[in-house]
Amino acid sequence: MKSGHDEIKDMLHGYLHGTLTKDASALVKDHLSCCDECADEFYIAGELLKIEAPDPGVSYYNNLTKAVLDTASVSVANRFNLWKYLFRPVPIAAAVSLCLIIFILSFGIFHSGHIQYAMQNNITMDAAASDEAMYSLLEEEEYGDGLAADDSGDDLTAML
Amino acid sequence: MDEDSRSEDNRLIDAYLDGGNESAIEELIVKYRKEVYLTAYRVAGDMEEAKDITQKALISAVSELRNFKRKSAFKTWLYRITVNAALNHTRGNAYKTVELCETIQSGERGADVCLIEKERARRLKGLLAGLPPRQRLSVILRVYRGLSLAETAAVMECSEGAVKSHYHLAINKLKTAMPADMQGKDL
Ligand SMILES: [Zn+2]
């Protein structure tokens, strides 16, 4: 066990606060009887600890917690809520998906009607225009997947 | 510092920052609010001022939680915010000393002892208040908050050697300034 002046000095606060083991306390006590420097420090620290701090009371602490939460978390929580709102999975994604489905369906119905009309009228469909229509559909599907990824919350986690 | 306590603090911080869990931050405030108040009180020397400082420090800590980089323990970081808030708050203010023993009736032996004790405490409180800020902080954090040398150094953002030196100077000044008749040592 440590017993030198420097080691005892480090243990003085533990001795004051009563947190040392019995053996360590005995070592400190012995050292204090023969070392003026440590004895002075111990005495002054002990006197300082006698100066009491007034207790502000339980109601102060309870109101404090509420006041801190109300004031501090407003700005932080608002920031969270904005992200939550932007990425809130159900309403936003559902609305966007619904719009996309309606758009895709109406687009498909319009085109199939158009092709039927063209075939009926012996008009050959332009291959390039057909590819273009397919590309725009794929693009919309990818866009739909992108939103689905946001729904999972991965992006949100990375951002926070 | 207790490693379990430190990782528990970090868990609560994550729960708040990642999940917006308000009860996690509430738990953290409840855990440290008294320590913050007591530290603020030791720096300011006045209960009402200490209450204001405590609120300011906690609001500032919660608002700035995102900037807490976890290089130190949350407790150390919070102490640093508290100490800075207290020093800023009291800058230019005279440290208030409390009038004691106004109601003591003279002639009672117990009352005399109380009077001497309280006068000694009042004088010591005044002496502590008169120390340069770094010396005063080293005493407040070491003696009143029971922080280790390493923790005190982390709060004060200086080396352990510097803390030792500030603390040693402070104790010597207090001892020298304490009138001889007040030094009733009993170990
Ligand atoms: Zn010694």
Image (cartoon, grey):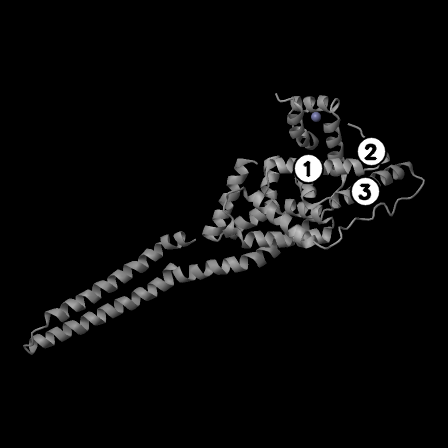
Q: Is residue A157 above or below residue A82?
A: above
Q: For the residue marked with disc 1, what is the amino acid?
A: Tyr
Q: How many marks?
A: 3
Q: Along the line of sight, which residue is nearer the eye, B87 or A122? A: B87
Q: Along the line of sight, which residue is nearer the eye, B115 or A48? A: A48
Q: Earlier in the sequence, mark 2 or mark 1?
A: 1
Residue B123, numbered label: 3
Does dot 1 land on a helix, a strand or a loop? helix
Q: To which chain does the residue with label 2 belong?
A: B
Quadrant location, the C terminus of chain B: top right
Q: To which chain does the residue with label 3 belong?
A: B
Q: Residues within 10 Å of mark 2 (few under 14, many from 20)?
A: some
Mark 2 and mark 3 on one chain: yes
**Whole-number angstrom distance, CA of label 2 to CA of label 1:** 20 Å
Judging by the rendered image, the residue that carries numbered circle 2 is B183
Ligand 1, by image quadrant, is top right
Q: Along the line of sight, which residue is nearer the eye, A13 or A81? A: A13
Residue B58, numbered label: none
Q: Is residue B155 visible?
A: yes
Residue at 92% from the left image edge and 39% from the top image edge: B108
Which-is-in-front pick, marks 1 and 3? 1
Quarter of the figure with residue A106 = bottom left
Judging by the rendered image, the residue that carries numbered circle 1 is B167
Q: For the residue marked with disc 3, what is the amino acid?
A: Arg
